[in-house]
Image (spheres, helix red, strand yellow):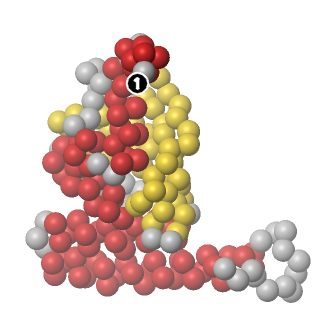
Amino acid sequence: MTEERDAASSMTTAEATIAAWRDAAERGDADAAGHLLAAGIEVISPLTEQFRFHRRDQVTAMLAAAFETISEIRFHTQVGADHTWALFFHARVGRQFVEEAQLLRLDASGHIHELTLFGRPLPALTAVMADIGPRLLRGQRRPALARLVGALTRPVAVLTRVGERRVVPLADPGRPHGTNPKRR
């Protein structure tokens, strides 16, 4: 216990923010994560280039939806110093594996002012898109748009999932020509 207190007291403000961010994400606690955000936070999503999330309340709502969609978050790599950090985790979207990279930029007070998200593989990202978009829109009391976005994104999620399982293995350069892909 004393060693933990000594380690915590020797952390910089930035290191403490990153540790708290990881803990909040692994617990799926959007409110705790929201307290680590700067008022002028900007989130750059891997799912669209059409808009960005701004303001602490908007980003906290996005995180709440993400934590309902993405489960079993476990960080495996952290690199960075001062005001720029990169974090990587494994998680699940339903039954699918997902890996996410996060680029975090902190302000002078140690709050996160920019968060850029990257993810893989594509079927997991399209599953996130098919779930999180409608979930966010329902939270904004826009049910008709939520239904439309769901109707447009679910087929993309299905196609990428089926393609990943049935077609992509055929392109494996290590697979002997003429054999069937492994069934999962």
Whether residue 54 can be seen here = no
- Measured as percent of width and height from the top left, residue 54 is found at 21, 47
Most distant residue in the right direction = 176
Left/right placement of residue 132 relative to residue 19 reads left
Measuring 40% from the left and 61% from the top, which residue is drawn there? 70
The N terminus lies in quadrant: top left
Residue 100, horizontal then vertical, whole percent: 49, 52
- Is 165 placed left or right of 80 in the picture? right
| Residue 137 in sight from this viewpoint | yes
Please say if 62 is above or below 16.
below
- Give the quadrant of residue 162: bottom right
Question: Local crowd at mark 1 within 10 Å, few (<14), some, or many (≥20)?
Answer: some
Picture residue at 22% right of the left edge, 46% below the top? 31
Choose between 96 and 170: the one closer to the eye: 96
From the top left corner, tell me how far across and down residue 107 is, in percent. 29, 26
Q: Is residue 123 above or below residue 39?
A: below
Q: Quadrant of the C terminus?
A: bottom right
Q: Nearer the viewer, residue 27 or 132?
A: 27
Looking at this rendering, what residue extends furthest in the left direction? 141
Q: Residue at x 32, y 38 (%)?
A: 114
Percent of width and height locating residue 18: 39, 32
Q: Is residue 183 above or below residue 62?
A: below
The disc labelled 1 sits on which kind of residue? Glu
Provide the residue designation for mark 1: 15
* Element type at mark 1: helix
Q: Quadrant of residue 115?
A: top left
Residue sitting at the far front: 1
